[in-house]
Amino acid sequence: MSEATKIKEFLKGNIKIPQFDHMVANKARDFQKQLTKPEGSLGKLEDIAIWMSGWQKTFKPTIKNPHCIIFAGNHGISNKGVSAYSSEVTAQMVENFKQGGAAINQLCKLAKIKLSVIPIELDKSTMDFSESKAMSEEEVLTFMQLGFDSIPSCCDLLILGEMGISNTTSATSISCALFNEPVDVMTGIGTGINKVQLSNKIKIINKALELHGKKFKDPVSILSCYGGKEIAAIAGSVISARIKSIPVLLDGFITTVAASTLICFKKNILDHCLVSHLSTEPGHARILNNLKKEPILDLNLRLGEGSGAAIASLILKAALATHNGMSTFENAKVSKKITS
């Protein structure tokens, strides 16, 4: 395994973290007031355009090179019957992605997003984290570095997705530990398990929490105990995007949890991330409440793959189309609101 140099340096605090450019954002906000519409009438679309301006550091942001990256990994916990599918399905779905047959392929075509699928050692699952740590800390760092290195510099919007049978069990365990939430409230049906399987899933997660505990001071240690390779890679990719000041659309439950592990390092590290949609996994709403983030959409999705984020990218494109393309009152020779 290669040395995770950039990730280690970042977590030591040796790499500068870009911040939101308030000066550019204010310029974009002032520009919004000049457009031929009542002020604030495009609601959240205006907020999104201003947010994009601050991270892209231009008052007329664009989405010309959006990239969707799906990381895939297998979990040793799948042997405990916590999913409706066996771990072999992960590799089968990766092949489906590559052949263009999944939902995310159609959505990326629609939204004109470049799609990359990165399987991570699918022939080797993580350890069963109800019995031991899922991965060593060096493995976590390596997979985070893989995610870090996967983000192209030309990307102007990063969409993150995942594939990994049983990864809702991993994500639920992480979120219960990270936010000290109750397991029975946070645990959902994942790929469609029945009531008996759900009860077993809750029991397995409780066992893991008893084994590893809930107190973690850094993302590497919590990922080592409960994480998956794809979850660690997502965390690394979020770091890379932050360093490059690339806006990020998190897909749903799994990607939100993966990104959330980084708040152990710095509370505002996810300021460059929007959450695309509210997952039907019950823990997602509680996580978003802890993060103080609102989802863009609520379509009762629980597919994963980056599907919700790809759909939400069309909302972002709408926000920028209106921001960049509308005439100002002056250019259109339209009278502004009369003020007394």
Image (cartoon, rainbow, N blue to C red):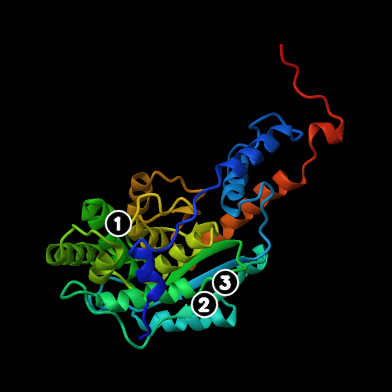
In this rendering, the label closer to the viewer, 2 or 1: 1
| Kind of residue indicated by mark 3 | Pro
Which residue appears at 45% of the width and 83% of the height? 92
Q: Which percent across, then down, holds residue 3?
A: 36, 81
Who comes first in sequence, dot 1 or dot 3? 3
Answer with left or right where residue 302 lies relative to residue 168: right
Identify the element where label 1 is drawn.
helix
**Is 242 placed above or below 92 here?**
above
Q: Which percent across, then down, holds residue 91?
A: 43, 83
Which residue appears at 69% of the width and 32% of the height? 33
Residue of label 3 = 152
Residue 264, labelled with which disc? 1
Q: Residues within 10 Å of mark 1 (few under 14, many from 20)?
A: some
The residue sitting at the bottom extreme is: 123
The answer, for residue 306, to whether it is visible in the render is no
Answer with left or right where residue 128 lies relative to residue 313: left
What separation in Å lies between label 1 and label 3 (alpha carbons)?
26 Å
Residue of label 2 = 117
